[in-house]
Image: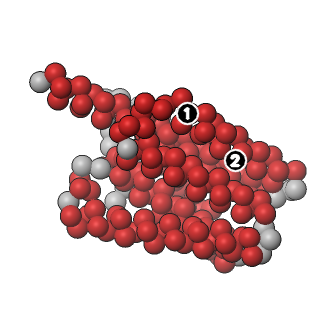
Amino acid sequence: MSTVAPMTPTTPLRHVWLKAAVFALLAFNTANYLVAGTLSEALDAASWLALLTLFELETDFGERLRAARAAAAVRCARLVAGVAVVVAAVGYVHDREWLDAVNSGLWIAIVILLEIQLRFSHAARHRRGFAATAATLYAGLAALVIAWIWQGEWFDAYDALLWLTALVIVEMNVLQLVARKSESACKQTAG
């Protein structure tokens, strides 16, 4: 299955190509970590790429994934990838890779924030609080890019910057999904 968003009148072609390019680069980075990285790096990269792909599938093809088998498969895959993310984070702490450990913690917090925004309708009432929290987490991720550059860890800095780009794409999908849900709710109350 493709993780590239289906073309809709509101999806510019450049967005589709950007998303495809980012996914391709992330897959390349994951392959690099699988071949040349530590066990924690390989597990981390593969599990986050799996989570991103699943999140994309849910936001782009959510209606098709509501069938019992598809929904169960997605939940199971997300659980396995989520456990792998936590195991990788623990591995970073064990190996005293503090920047990687902090990076994992920030990403886990961002995923929790996104999940709350997507899964609970009352979250829309607290949009400012979510935006402030997200901005703080994103600033932390940006600071890590600078820290990796400062330490001469160029590939880690590039990878982190690429993941920030992916995060922007995910945020755009979340905003589109929330807008579609709001539009649908307004049509139901009007009709």
Residue farthest to the left? 191
The residue that appears at 48% across and 46% down in the rendered structure is 114
Question: Is 189 above or below relative to 24?
Answer: above
Nearer the camera: disc 1 or disc 2: 1
Quadrant assignment, res 105: bottom right
Q: Is residue 42 left or right of residue 9?
A: right
Q: Are marks 1 and 2 in contact (CB under 8 Å)?
A: no
Residue type at the position of mark 2: Leu
Task: Write the residue at 69% across / 74% down.
Answer: 91
Mark 2 residue element: helix
Pointer 1 or 2: first along the chain: 1
Residue 176 placement, left or right of 159: left
Q: Is residue 21 visible?
A: no
Q: How packed is label 2: few (under 14 Cα within 10 Å), some, or many (20 or more)?
A: many
Q: Quadrant of the N terminus?
A: bottom left
Measuring from the top left, give residue 157's x and y in whole percent: 75, 53
Q: Residue at x 30, y 49 (%)?
A: 61
Of the numbered discs in the image, which one, if any, rests on residue 129?
A: 1
As shown in the figure, which amino acid type bears the numbered disc 1? Gly
Residue 149 image point, x, y percent: 83, 50
Instruction: Specify the quadrant that holds the C terminus.
Output: top left
Residue located 29% across and 50% down the image: 62
Mark carried by residue 64: none
Q: Is residue 10 visible?
A: yes
Specify few, some or many for label 1: CA neighbours under 10 Å numbering under 14, 14-19, or 20 or more.
few
Q: Is residue 188 left or right of residue 172?
A: left
Give the labeled residue for mark 2.
141
At which x and y percent is residue 64? 23, 53
Indicate the position of residue 84 as horizontal and vertical percent values.
Answer: 54, 72
Q: Element type at marker 1?
A: helix
| Quadrant in the picture for residue 65 | bottom left
Q: Nearer the viewer, residue 91 or 70?
A: 91
